[in-house]
Image: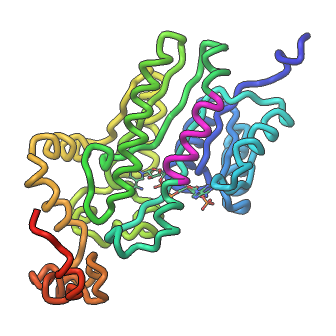
Amino acid sequence: MTLKQEFRPAVIVVGASRGIGKAIAEVAARDGATVVLVARSPEDLQAVAAAIQKAGGEAFTLALDLTARDAAARLEDFLSEKRLICDVLVNSAGYGLRGGAATLPLDEQLGLIDLNIRVVTELTPRFLPGMVARGRGGVINLGSVASFTPGPFMALYYASKGFVRSFSEALHQEVRRAGVTVTCVAPGPVSTEFLEKSGANRAALFKVLPKLDAKYVAERAWRGFKARRRLVIPGTSAKLAILVSGLLPSAALLPLIGRLQLRGNDPCPCGSGKTFRDCCRAGRSQRHAPSETRARSLPL
Ligand SMILES: NC(=O)c1ccc[n+]([C@@H]2O[C@H](COP(=O)([O-])OP(=O)(O)OC[C@H]3O[C@@H](n4cnc5c(N)ncnc54)[C@H](OP(=O)(O)O)[C@@H]3O)[C@@H](O)[C@H]2O)c1
């Protein structure tokens, strides 16, 4: 028996300690897959693994901050130590930030790019060559309905998901004939900690859109991936939101999203230190602009 034959295929879920990642890991394990659960919180990972094992599945855990520069290498080392192959990679770790790009802390904005874009970009091509060589498996990347439009006051989050969808759809085309599937899952709001942590649940936009259950999204994602779909949009409301955003011209869509995403008592995106209600929304943006800025601004 060669060394290679001793390795077993596994589904690697990054962002598996809670939310959509946890739900996808549970669905995959129920389907008979050996799962590797990756996130930062060891206790939460252990709890997910224990539940999977109790239900008769097999789960390994790896507590890892994916933004650490050696994270991908440590994941690879862990897999070879456990004699596992990344058959399916699920990129579900991610976070959002609501607010004006001019006022949100820069380190948090760069951190979002690191997790939502760089980590996906590093992990996907790292495991893809093996999948192509074996002619099986693939990648599930968590995009969002936000990937279909720019999103004022969650600008980086929307842009990061735009990247994920574009990257995933292109890769789908590149590797599909090799027997490998890359699926982008693009849900609307899902009831997870993401909504609270990102501040999205305080925006009117996320209040009007119905929230999906993480289990429902996970089942759609897994089923769509197995059916070799390029794009999975769980739920009718998400499909409608994408349709409407595609029909509206940007001149109408962007102010609408901006209005639905920033609340009156949020800090004003111009950085004046006042609330949005008392500042730019009231049309006073010129009144507080420093005179030096006004003097330098040229009519274009
Ligand atoms: N919820 C929604 O409304 C929604 C809608 C559309 C798309 N999405 C996307 O779906 C994905 C999953 O979202 P969710 O709702 O499940 O979010 P969530 O409940 O906040 O879960 C995020 C997961 O990512 C892990 N994570 C965060 N930072 C990490 C890091 N530096 N290293 C390793 N793991 C890290 C978290 O675990 P630890 O904290 O333990 O590390 C957790 O397991 C995200 O990409 C999100 O953008 C969410």
**Residue that protrudes farthest toward the right in the picture:** 1
| Along the viewing direction, whichever of 230 and 43 lies nearer the viewer | 230
Relative vertical location of residue 275 with respect to residue 61 in this rendering, above or below: below
In the rendering, at what x and y percent does residue 297 appear? 17, 73
- Residue at x 9%, y 67% (from the top left corner): 299
Indicate yes or no whether the magenta region holds residue 24.
Answer: no
Side of 103 where 26 appears, left or right: right
Side of 60 where 231 appears, left or right: left
- Residue at x 18%, y 43% (from the top left corner): 240
In the rendering, at what x and y percent does residue 36 appear? 70, 41
- Residue at x 47%, y 69% (from the top left corner): 106
For the magenta stretch, what is the residue range? 114-127
Indicate yes or no whether the magenta region holds residue 118.
Answer: yes
Majority secondary structure of the magenta segment? Answer: helix
Q: Quadrant of the N terminus?
A: top right
| Along the viewing direction, whichever of 54 and 19 lies nearer the viewer | 19
Q: Quadrant of the C terminus?
A: bottom left
Relative vertical location of residue 285 with respect to residue 194 in this rendering, above or below: below
In the rendering, at what x and y percent does residue 140 appear? 50, 34
| Along the viewing direction, whichever of 249 and 39 lies nearer the viewer | 249
In the rendering, at what x and y percent does residue 201 appear? 33, 68
- Residue at x 71%, y 38% (from the top left corner): 56
Total marks shown come to 0
What colouring does the structure picture have?
Answer: rainbow
| Along the viewing direction, whichever of 100 and 265 lies nearer the viewer | 100
